[in-house]
Amino acid sequence: MNTRGTAVDLSTMKVRHWITDQSGVTTNSTRCDWSPLGCSSITHRAAAMSSPKAGADHCLEIGFGSGSLAAGASTG
């Protein structure tokens, strides 16, 4: 939800979530199941951190390829 008074460039927005991989899997993958913007508009990746921290050794990153979000609008 864009609570600013102006549009936001979605390509500058990223959400990161740091996790600890307890599965022992050496490679992780992501996929978009559904998005109101269309999965082709969503960027995503999961990767091991080059400098792990206590409680986090991987990062899940979700972003947007392009477009803008108008003031008061939501990405869903």
Image: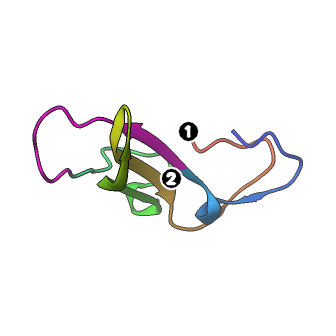
Q: Secondary structure at mark 2?
A: loop
Answer above or below: position of 67 versus 55. Answer: below
The label on residue 37 is 2
Please state the horizontal and vertical placement of residue 22, each as a whole percent of the image. Answer: 18, 32
> Which of these two is toward me, 29 or 39?
29
Query: Which is the main secondary structure of the residues drawn in magenta?
Result: loop
Residue indicated by mark 1: 76
Rendered image quadrant of residue 54: top left
> Which of these two is toward me, 37 or 48?
48
Tell me where the magenta segment starts and ends, as one range: 15-28
Please state the horizontal and vertical placement of residue 56, each as a whole percent of the image. Answer: 36, 38
Rendered image quadrant of residue 53: top left
> Which of these two is toward me, 36 or 55?
55
Tell me which residue sits at (76%, 53%) in the image: 70
Three-letter residue code for mark 2: Leu
Answer above or below: position of 65 versus 59. Answer: below
Q: What is the crowding at mark 2: few (fewer than 14 residues within 10 Å), some, or many (at least 20)?
A: few
Q: What is the crowding at mark 1: few (fewer than 14 residues within 10 Å), some, or many (at least 20)?
A: few
Please state the horizontal and vertical placement of residue 72, each as a whole percent of the image. Answer: 79, 41
Instruction: Find the distance from the CA under tag 1 to the CA under tag 2.
Output: 8 Å
